[in-house]
Image (cartoon, helix red, strand yellow):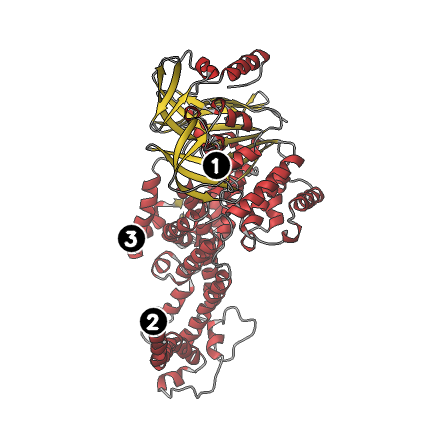
């Protein structure tokens, strides 16, 4: 009887709430999609149109901004541009290299570390586990100055040594070979930054893998690495995907550290965009176009990775 | 089949010793059941044989070769887990072939082996399903199939039926018995269910508190338990225990307790000849009590019947003898009135006698003879 009454009220409430509920949904959708629509619209306008404020969605679309943004990798001559100042293509490739490599390395190191922390008993285990989270508490801005100093002055190979000479001969440049300004330098700091979180999130997934599965695999003749790669890893795929999305997104968006640690040849897209704003001229159209281009890889990556997130992966393994 | 031998197997977790030197020898292709209440160390023993737990002291021998330092994969054992432990990301065929694939056996051989085992267990229609799409019984069968494809010399079972519902358990028990007939391998089976132990085992090993209490054929253990624990553990409903004092009155000796007084016959007197204590514990199987209104008071118990549990052909009566609870198992058509004081007779040779201080059984004279005979002929009676 009581349940029936409950159902009645809830049904009643649902009916009454519907208009407000939909209004809320519309607001939410506008808030999340609005800026993207605005960016897309503006990226297809000329600067004149943007600034003059003849706003609205009625305008003659142009791909000029995209041409400007991609001038260094487009195979044809661009009419409206005398000189290709914006090296978006190069920066885009830099961003891809840095984000992908740092994501892959973070996941490889992270899943192994997480497995060890969960399954093995060793000295200093709790300390390691605790410090992984501690590192997360330090804001990247604090790291910036010391890392800049270290990358420029400490982790260098003297140009007088044969190895330093070889690198200089191959890649060119002056001075000692340092981490600063290289892809590796940025990748390294991104790995250090993301690793704690990845370890932490993967730990919670590994804990859920029933120990009996690993024991069964050991009885079936699997060694430690086979247990890890053939049993544990496939089962924590959703965790890996979530961690990958997170890591890739951070590495793709990161501005502060990349701006200090990259040089002209290794700068990433976020830095390029900001560099495009000078005090004399803000090329809104080009910024919007680069913004749109910047958004595409994470979207593709997220769509791809999120397909791996299937809940209930361990269902049916053991009787719950 | 290799011969498995445990020698003084001991397990400690920190300072707590939970297995106190288990020594056991299993015969060729024998179905050995380790049985005992939870926490008795039976699963730990099995896991030590499997190599999933380290050995604190003692040694495990397979064919005379010490193996306690070997990894599980080097021991040639297959194991069925209590919770099935099927790999959820692999289908049934891949679950069953996992070990063979690790051994890098040829594809054809693997396929043939899978088909053979799946056929035997009735799993052929499910080979491409994931474990999540199977019922409990089917999962259990896959778990067994995975062990069978291995073709190891020895199978270990860790309470494989305990997660199934009662009906399925009975069915799977029968299937296990059937498989047992077809597969001639060493099998070590752990369970807390004494019915499983009785029905499946060639040899039962009863464990309690990290010690082996008794081992032998099911019938042997049921008929001649060496102590009160084994007597009470095996058999449903469990054995009744009544405390009594030994009293001499005139020419006769009586076992007298709360609500009964049994007159000892000659074999019983001989049995008690070396027993000096005045107190004694009587063990009576519920099925040994027979409803007999005309029985003599010196060979019967007078019981007040409180509850009759109807099971079918048999009924279990829960009665009181003085202040002590007594269970009786009899045919359901026996005319019984609840709440009445009724007389149940018994044969004195069916009586089990225990020393209440150390709980050891006082054996029947025939059994003592038998023991001497077996010992001289080299049988392993404990």
Residue B35 to residue A226: above or below: above
Q: Residues within 10 Å of mark 1 (few under 14, many from 20)?
A: many
Say which element carries label 2: helix
Q: Nearer the viewer, mark 1 or mark 2?
A: 1
Q: CA distance from mark 1 to mark 2?
A: 52 Å
Q: CA distance from mark 3 to mark 1?
A: 70 Å
Protein chain holding label 2: A
Q: Residues within 10 Å of mark 2 (few under 14, many from 20)?
A: few
Question: Which residue does the numbered mark 3 point to in the structure image?
Answer: A137
Using the image as rendered, state which of residue B91 and residue B217 is in the foreground.
B217
Q: Nearer the viewer, mark 3 or mark 1?
A: 1
Name the side, left or right, on which A202 lies relative to B189.
left
Using the image as rendered, state which of residue B310 and residue A126 is in the foreground.
B310
Question: Which residue does the numbered mark 2 point to in the structure image?
Answer: A6
- The answer to whether dots 1 and 2 both sit on one chain is no
Using the image as rendered, state which of residue B53 and residue B42 is in the foreground.
B42
- The answer to whether dots 3 and 2 both sit on one chain is yes
Question: Which residue does the numbered mark 1 point to in the structure image?
Answer: B329
Residue B196 in view here: yes
């Amino acid at each position: 009887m009581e349940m029936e009454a409950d159902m009645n009220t809830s049904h009643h409430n649902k009916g009454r709430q519907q208009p407000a509920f939909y209004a809320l949904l519309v607001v939410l959708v506008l808030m999340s999609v609005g800026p993207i629509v605005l960016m897309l619209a503006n990226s297809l306008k000329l600067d004149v149109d943007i600034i003059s404020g003849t706003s609205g969605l009625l305008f003659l679309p142009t791909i000029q901004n995209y041409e400007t943004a991609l001038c260094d990798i487009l195979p044809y001559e661009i009419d409206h541009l005398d000189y290709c100042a914006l090296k978006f293509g190069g920066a885009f490739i830099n961003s891809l290299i840095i984000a992908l490599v740092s994501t892959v390395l973070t996941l490889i190191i992270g899943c192994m570390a997480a497995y060890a922390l969960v399954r093995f008993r060793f000295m200093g285990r709790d300390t390691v586990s605790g410090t992984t989270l501690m590192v997360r508490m330090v804001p990247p801005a604090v790291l910036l100055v010391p890392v800049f100093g270290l990358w420029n002055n400490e982790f260098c190979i003297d140009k007088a040594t044969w190895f330093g000479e070889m690198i200089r001969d191959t890649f060119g440049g002056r001075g000692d070979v340092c981490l600063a300004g290289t892809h590796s330098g940025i990748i390294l700091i991104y790995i250090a930054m993301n690793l704690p979180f990845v370890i932490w999130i993967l730990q919670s997934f590994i804990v859920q893998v029933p120990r009996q599965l690993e024991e069964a695999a050991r009885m079936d003749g699997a060694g430690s690495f086979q247990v890890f790669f053939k049993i544990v890893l496939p089962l924590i795929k959703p965790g890996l995907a979530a961690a990958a999305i997170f890591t890739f997104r951070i590495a793709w968006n990161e501005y502060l550290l990349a701006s200090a640690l990259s040089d002209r040849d290794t700068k990433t897209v976020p830095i390029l965009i900001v560099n495009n704003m000078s005090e004399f001229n803000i090329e809104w159209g080009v910024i919007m176009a680069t913004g749109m281009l910047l958004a595409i890889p994470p979207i593709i990556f997220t769509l791809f990775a999120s397909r791996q997130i299937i809940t209930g992966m361990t269902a049916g393994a053991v009787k719950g | 089949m290799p011969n498995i031998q445990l020698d003084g197997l001991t397990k400690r977790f920190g300072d707590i010793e939970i297995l106190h030197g288990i020594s056991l020898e299993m015969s060729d292709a024998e179905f050995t059941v380790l049985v005992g209440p939870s926490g008795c160390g039976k699963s730990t023993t099995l896991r030590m044989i499997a190599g999933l737990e380290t050995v604190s002291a003692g040694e495990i021998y397979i064919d005379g070769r010490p193996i306690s330092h070997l990894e599980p994969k080097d021991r040639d054992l297959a194991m069925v887990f209590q919770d099935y432990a099927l790999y959820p990301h692999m289908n049934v065929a891949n679950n069953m072939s996992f070990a063979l694939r690790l051994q890098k056996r040829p594809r054809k051989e693997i396929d043939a082996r899978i088909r053979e085992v799946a056929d035997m267990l009735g799993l052929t229609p499910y080979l491409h399903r994931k474990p999540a799409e199977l019922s409990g019984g089917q999962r259990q069968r896959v778990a067994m199939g995975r062990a069978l494809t291995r073709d190891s010399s020895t199978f270990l079972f860790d309470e494989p039926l305990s997660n199934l519902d009662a009906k399925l358990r009975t069915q799977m028990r029968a299937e296990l018995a059937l498989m047992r007939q077809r597969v001639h391998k060493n099998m070590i089976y752990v369970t807390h269910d004494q019915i499983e132990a009785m029905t499946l085992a060639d040899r039962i090993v009863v464990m309690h508190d990290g010690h082996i209490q008794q081992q032998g054929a099911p019938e042997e253990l049921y008929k001649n338990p060496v102590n009160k624990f084994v007597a009470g553990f095996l058999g449903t409903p469990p054995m009744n225990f009544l405390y009594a004092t030994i009293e001499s009155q005139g020419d006769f000796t009586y076992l007298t307790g709360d609500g009964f007084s049994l007159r000892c016959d000659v074999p019983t007197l001989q049995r008690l000849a070396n027993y000096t204590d005045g107190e004694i514990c009587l063990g009576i199987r519920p099925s040994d009590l027979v409803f007999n209104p005309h029985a003599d008071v010196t060979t019967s118990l007078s019981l007040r019947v409180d509850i009759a549990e109807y099971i079918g052909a048999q009924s279990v009566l829960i009665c009181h003898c003085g202040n002590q609870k007594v269970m009786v198992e009899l045919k359901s058509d026996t005319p019984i009135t609840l709440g009445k004081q009724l007389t149940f007779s018994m044969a004195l040779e069916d009586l089990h006698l225990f020393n209440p201080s150390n709980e050891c059984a006082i054996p029947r004279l025939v059994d003592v003879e038998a023991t001497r005979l077996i010992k001289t002929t080299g049988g392993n009676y404990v």
